[in-house]
Amino acid sequence: MRLTRLFILGLSSFLILTACSTKEEEEAKESTTEEKAEPKEVTEEDIDDEVLQKVVDQSKEVESYHTSLDIEAELDEEDDETLNVEVDYIDSNPPEIALTSLDVLRTVSKDGRTYFNNDEEWVEITDSIEESAVFSVTYQQVVNTLMTVKDKLEHEAVNGKDVYKYEGNDENVYRAIERLIHVNFGNVNTSNNDTKFKFVINNDKRIEKVEFDVEINDDEGKVDLKGESNFSQFNEVKEIELPEEIE
């Protein structure tokens, strides 16, 4: 398999899943970087849907939450990578975060300091990682993504909940997923995609789940990408505690 078809899940810098050396990573990044037009920022004046307006209004009241993120990516029906994390998130400045993977507490951010558990000890990584790289699929980012693609979505009521969903091959919708989860498939041509995207909104007008399922076919093979993120315990996470080994 060519290097340019290796893929990276960039959801958290220490959970990067790749099979190339540092030099190769740099070369791949250089060879695949391209300027993509950023979506137009959505203002409240652009929202003409009562439910979505309430979602935006309610998002301003969200101060903390628990979220889970599960992603599976398969390249050319051969290379399969998965990512599963649980996160407690306090939307302070800077954010406070406790990230668990496979039942192991891996990363904690508190009081502007970030620590990583490398299975042997806790290491401070504050100076080597940007805040936004610790965990990027935040509730506010999901709300922003919903607003970005809202005009492409169909709305229906299911079991008392509002469901906004999309099925099709619009590359802008796919790019919205790509930006949300920070995925990079190198030189894969993503224009031929079959994309499903769904947001589930509860009775409190908060997003409780976002799901995506993407199949991409180009001249060299196939990419399958699917995942979901769930949100709960809104405003119930009161404190992020540092492990005793750090204190």
Image (tube, rainbow, N blue to C red):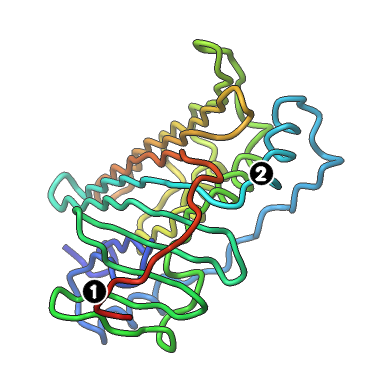
Q: Residue at x 38, y 54 (%)?
A: 87
Question: Which of 9 and 232 lies nearest the eye of the viewer?
Answer: 232
Does 95 appear above or below 247? above
Q: Toward which corner of the image does residue 24 lie, by quadrant?
A: bottom left
At label 2, which amino acid type do we have? Ser
Q: Residue at x 62, y 47 (%)?
A: 62
Question: Which of 207 and 40 lies nearest the eye of the viewer?
Answer: 207
Q: Residue at x 87, y 40 (%)?
A: 45
Task: Name the element at disc 1.
Answer: strand
Does 153 appear above or below 9? above
Q: Toward which corner of the image does residue 184 lie, by quadrant?
A: bottom left
Residue 26 in the image, given as x and y percentages of width and height = 34, 83
Which residue is labeled 1 in the image? Answer: 117
Residue 205 in the image, given as x and y percentages of width and height = 64, 29
At label 1, which amino acid type do we have? Asn
Task: Name the element at disc 2.
Answer: helix
Circle nearer the N terminus (2, 1): 2
Crowd band around label 2 with a 10 angstrom C-alpha radius: few (<14), some (14–19), many (20+): some
Residue 140 in the image, given as x and y percentages of width and height = 60, 51
Q: Check residue 59 in the rendering and tell me which mark sits there, or answer none.
A: 2
Q: Are marks 2 and 1 in contact (CB under 8 Å)?
A: no
